[in-house]
Image: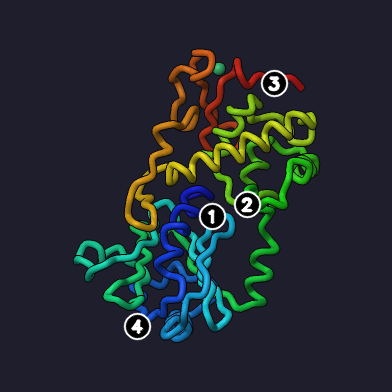
Amino acid sequence: MPELPEVETIVRDLRPILAGRRLRHPTLHHTDILRRVRPSRLLRTLDGNRIMEVGRRAKHVVLRLESGHRLVIQPGMTGTLVVHHRRLTAVQRRYAVLEAGIGRGERLVYRDVRRLGVIWLLDDRGWRSYTARIGPEPLDPDFDASAFAAQLRGTRQAIKKVLMDQRRLAGVGNIYANEALFRARIDPSRRSDRLRPQEAHALFGSLREVLQAAIAAKGTTVRDYRTGTGQAGSFQDILQVYGRGGLACPRCGTRLATTHAIDARQTTFCWRCQRSSG
Ligand SMILES: [Zn+2]
């Protein structure tokens, strides 16, 4: 599913278009991805409401509305949030889940082919409890290497699982966990609490670097991911390990190994560069 860089890309594309716009005549084509809100209340709340702010939390797009509600959209593997400048074609409408007019003949559309995404409508209290359950944002300037290292010390789980645990760290999924561990030369199966302070610092640096590089490349395109303007991202062209199992390690030429033993997800690593040393 889209991770922090992909959702951040969608948000940066949509922010200048959506901020200040009023939602008109919202339509819900499917209701099975709604959480904590009935269709009728969602539509009533959205109609005429103004979008004050377009933000991101973890892997979710957050639209703060004038009423104080937040519309939170987590695009699933096959989900995208885009602005259409003309009427939707029949094919586009087929996969649309939620759409609303935003003025000037434009429409905001959440489309999701397999409907694996989630939509929440949260009031202020709901938002506070939602955001309190998610860990710190890795790119938050107030979150530093020591705070990151403290998160890692609290658990004996494999470091890769800890990076992807949304309660400990926001927004990182399988792609960027694999990439950050390779860049920091850390074995993905290492016990989190056994990382030395300098390793935790190196991993923090690698993680930020890879997330920022991915945002600059407008994300990694797998499946149906598109940016907020409907483009594909290009970070898949510069991935070093993810999806490259069996190919040569870009650093030492050793054949990259793939395992599902850590978290049942695909973990690709170089046994030579990421050799366990503790
Ligand atoms: Zn290597």
Q: Nearer the viewer, residue 54 or 163?
A: 54
Is tag 4's residue or tag 3's residue first in the polypeptide sequence?
A: 4
Q: Classify mark 3 as within 8 Å of ligand 1 or not, answering yes or no.
A: no
Q: Amino acid at mark 4?
A: His
Q: Secondary structure at mark 2?
A: loop
**Label 4, label 3: how far apart the Cα atoms are:** 57 Å
Q: Nearer the viewer, residue 74 or 228?
A: 228
Is tag 4's residue or tag 2's residue first in the polypeptide sequence?
A: 4
Q: Which mark is residue 170?
A: 2
Q: Secondary structure at mark 3?
A: loop
**Label 1, label 2: how far apart the Cα atoms are:** 7 Å
**Label 4, label 1: how far apart the Cα atoms are:** 27 Å
Is tag 4's residue or tag 1's residue first in the polypeptide sequence?
A: 4
Occupied quadrant, residue 27: bottom left
Residue at (43, 65) in percent of width and height: 16
Circle 1 packing at 10 Å, graded few (<14), some (14-19), many (20+), is many
Give the residue number, with chain letter if any, for mark 3: 276
Whether residues under marks 4 and 3 lie with C-beta atoms below 8 angstroms apart, the answer is: no
**Label 3, label 2: how far apart the Cα atoms are:** 26 Å
Is tag 3's residue or tag 1's residue first in the polypeptide sequence?
A: 1
Residue at (60, 15) in percent of width and height: 272
Give the residue number, with chain letter if any, for mark 1: 59
Is tag 3's residue or tag 2's residue first in the polypeptide sequence?
A: 2
